[in-house]
Amino acid sequence: MAVSVRAAAASALADLHRRQGYSNIVLDELLKAAPIGDADRALLSRLFYGVIERRLTLDYVIGGCSSTPVRKMHPLVRETLRVAAYQILFMDRIPVSAAVNEAVTAVRTLKQGHTAGFVNAVLRAVSRRRDCWTEELPAGDEGLSLRYSCPRELIAFWRAAYGEERMRSLLDSLQQAPDEYVRVNTLLTADENFVEALASIGANHQNFADLPHCFRLNCAYLLNKLESEQKNWYYYQDIASQWACCALDARPGERIADVCAAPGGKSLTTAQYMGNTGYVLACDVYEHKCNVMAERARQYGIAILETAVRDAALPCKEELRGTFDRVICDVPCSGLGVIRRKPEIRYKNLAEFGDLPALQYTILENSAQLVRPGGVLQYSTCTLNPAENEEIARRFLREHPEFSPRILPIAPCFEALGIEPDYHITLFPPVHGSDGFFIAGFIKNEVAG
């Protein structure tokens, strides 16, 4: 039986709202269950993420065309209207008539056929506002919120944190799909072999010159066509995470601890920097995540990685204290740097993140116990929030005189911001082309003899 892409998208969006879950998990579940081809999968993904990204804008336009408030509509009808309105307003290649007709078909598929006339009328009205809705926006932050589908609270927050110009560039970046980056698994192949494999399947790519073994892909879905033995030659890793691994500068033969490691990308890349010699301890609080990391390491040919179930918020065991050359402390965070990948994060109440800095600082302090004299401690988050980033780093140095700042060896990242290298940096999507990310480096002072 053929799957209605629009009905599937509307159903998944209603499910996401009901479960208050993560968009990537809900979509993955749907794509695994739905028997559809590559083209329809791509359309379904775009509609699903597009509606989440533009929800405030869509509701503003739909609300102006409907006698029924958007919030009072049946969830499946509301999401069907959003899907169709997204096509009408933001997808030029889909004719308006097709978007309207497909929406009417979708509500019937979803057993909401009695609303077909209403859906048709609202979408016809939306189509008449297609080229003029931006001209009707109010002034100030309310207008910015509706134009960029970003809550006014977050706009004001970023303005206070980074200034007007940076805030506006961040809003612009929210409307752009993130680039897809992969890192070549140097333990199983060489860059030139991977390039030949990409050419064989017609996958366009660009080498990322500033990072070793890093490639940007323009059509990542084609990687499904690689031979089975070639699928462990690479893995997805945003350049922000790759920069963090580069900044760590792990060496062959060292002992490395990754205290909040899942899903394990930084541990995998670090092991490759080490030439698969030494020891990497990858920890997570959940056993099943540790098992997944161990299996990934096996598949990628990594022999030096061991996993351990461990709560990084608790003091480390006595036998581990001071035994690691470098410690990766990539803590749980609010995720405000990965909104392009998980667009639902933008709608969260910022007050929900208020308890995070205390947890993050506890994890950082406990992780510091693992570092040997002369060793490196690196703190990172994937958020754009000074309270979780710079303020944590400054507090740690203030309260731990046994550590000193460590200048991060990632000069191109500082050059992009026009500043001198320092012990911490914020990576911004519109500046670095990466996820929003924060990295801070510390070095434990040598003990006088």
Image (tube, rainbow, N blue to C red):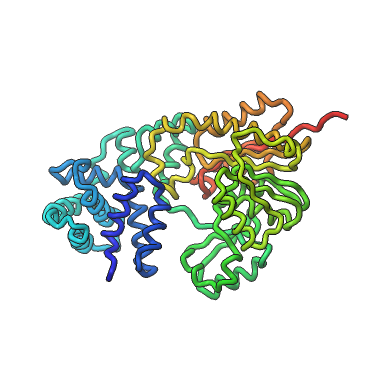
Is residue 135 shown left or right of residue 223? left
- Where residue 228 appears, as percent x and y from the top left, is 56, 72
Task: Name the residue rendered at 59%, 54% in the picture.
Answer: 293
Dividing the picture into quarters, in which one does residue 441 lie? Answer: top right
Please, which residue is most extreme toward the bottom here? Answer: 200
- Viewer-nearest residue: 273 or 131: 273
Q: Is residue 55 visible?
A: yes
Image quadrant occupied by the C terminus: top right
- Where residue 354 appears, as percent x and y from the top left, is 46, 29
Task: Name the residue rendered at 27%, 57% in the picture.
Answer: 87
- Where residue 316 appears, as percent x and y from the top left, is 67, 36
Q: How many marks?
A: 0
Please, which residue is most extreme toward the top here? Answer: 399
Is residue 43 shown left or right of residue 304? left
Q: Is residue 418 visible?
A: no
326 over 304 or under it: above or below: above
Task: Name the residue rendered at 47%, 53% in the picture.
Answer: 178
Task: Name the residue rendered at 26%, 39% in the picture.
Answer: 137
Image quadrant occupied by the N terminus: bottom left
- Where residue 446 appears, as percent x and y from the top left, is 80, 33
- Viewer-nearest residue: 362 or 337: 362
Dividing the picture into quarters, in which one does residue 38 lie? Answer: bottom left
